[in-house]
Amino acid sequence: MMDWFGRLSSGIPMVDWNQHTLRNFIQAHFQPRQTQASPSWVNSVSFQPRADGTLLIQFPHTYFRDWFGQYLQKDFEAFIQNNFPGISGFVYQDQIFHHQHKESIFQPFQGDDRHTFKRFLCNEKNSQQMMAALSIINQSPWPSQSLLICGPPGCGKSHFLLAMANALLAAETSGPVLAITCEDLLSLDRLPAEDKERAKNEIRTAQAFFLDDVHRIDKSPALQDELLALYDALEEQGVPMVFTCLRKLSENGEVKPNLRSRLEGGGILHLKRPDLDIRLQFVQQETQAHGLHLPESDQLNLARQCQDFQSISHVLFKLLAQKDLRSSARKKDISEYIARSSADEPQPMTCEEIMTRVAEHFSLPVQELTSHRRHQKSVLARQMAIYICRNLHHISFTQLGSLFGGRNHSSIIYAFKKIQSLQKERPEVKSQVQNLLKQCDENSCKTRS
């Protein structure tokens, strides 16, 4: 496998490439804002090179393969071929159903030496959270049976969750430990009834349950009921549970109150974004691990430009994928390349910038969007701004209410759903919304400069 990856990357040492590196590289590309899918889907798929130069992609379930074919396959193949010109084609297979239900729907967690507490970089901002997690892991039974890890994108929530799973696995637990993503859980809806029940039974019989990105369950009210029942069953058996969540669940009005109360009823850890010194340590750690020799000034430049671990990883893997990286580094200033790589994925405008852009589009003062005037033009502009902020930032309805003049939760939900329905009924509204979304997303960096 190493030799195959070495040939594909033409110029990157063979030791730098393995399935884990490729997996992280793919994951860095498929961001939720681009694909409407969590990049963690990559963790459930196997990538294997074949002697004929094709890439074998194996899926855990048929329903996962169907979802991939509908939403991601075309972009995935183009992305791989653009970065790895040595690939001659793709072969897709399902793993589970070849053995007539002899394998599990959810494969038990086998351990991950990359995501450990020893490798989690933190300073005073997150040191107490680290100590709390270690304290929980070292007690039996856990003082708090369920734990919710909250924090902004790129702060290390997934790493923290897997570090706890690794620590629990090292304690020689007597049964299977499950560590899955919310996308795995959401995909249960596409399983046949018999297999869906078998999958739920695997969760009910686990000795520990770890679920990443639980906030994404707001997409499915029915699955929220399923998770509630599973939570109660695991709680009754005293099974440890850990969840990660973007921000606080109390700020997400689409998560049902009874499920929210369960998830927030145990321990809660709030992770914060890494400071510059931690980001720099992360850059140094990753460049050393992958043999990517960046000057100290460029490492500092990268740590300053990228505000979280996820963004840094994205740039580093793009650097690794450039077959002419080492020759180009000798000819031109690599810091220019880092700046260009960072700019390839522009961040959306802030909510305040979005409000200004929408107000300008409607030729209104921005204060109209936070006022309580009911003029038709002002109402439509306000509703569009709410819709765009929600789409680009996944901000809670409660937070949106505060931004838009202290409106209550119900008014914000009404505004959001109103634009959803108007786009179906009126093509001109759909065109306006889509154009504004594009401006506020793709052109944000140009606007700020």
Image (spheres, rainbow, N blue to C red):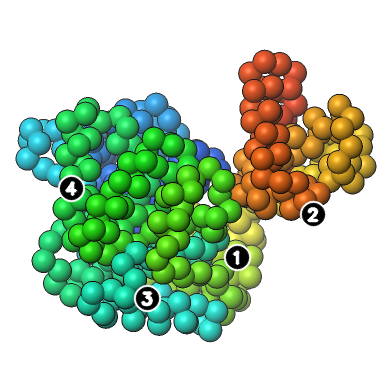
Mark 4 sits on what residue?
202
The mark that comes first in sequence, 4 or 1, is 4
Residue 373: where, in percent of width, then height? 89, 37
Element type where label 2 sits in the image: loop
Element type where label 3 sits in the image: helix
Residue 283: where, in percent of width, then height? 49, 71
Residue 222: where, in percent of width, then height? 39, 35
Give me the residue at 41% from left, 57% from top: 263
Name the one closer to the observer, 31 or 133.
133
The mark that comes first in sequence, 1 or 3, is 3
Q: Nearer the viewer, mark 1 or mark 3?
A: 3
The mark that comes first in sequence, 2 or 3, is 3
State the separation of the CA atoms marked 4 and 2.
52 Å
CB contact under 8 Å: marks 4 and 2: no
Name the one closer to the observer, 438 or 388.
388
Mark 3 sits on what residue?
133
Element type where label 4 sits in the image: helix
The mark that comes first in sequence, 4 or 2, is 4
The residue type indicated by label 1 comes to Gln
Badge 3: how crowded within 10 Å, few (<14), some, or many (20+)? Answer: many
Mark 1 sits on what residue?
307
Element type where label 1 sits in the image: loop
Name the one closer to the observer, 394 or 224.
224
Give me the residue at 34% from left, 71% from top: 144
The residue type indicated by label 3 comes to Ala
The residue type indicated by label 4 comes to Glu
The mark that comes first in sequence, 2 or 1, is 1
Query: Where is residue 37, by image quadrant?
Result: top left
Give me the residue at 62% from left, 40% from top: 391
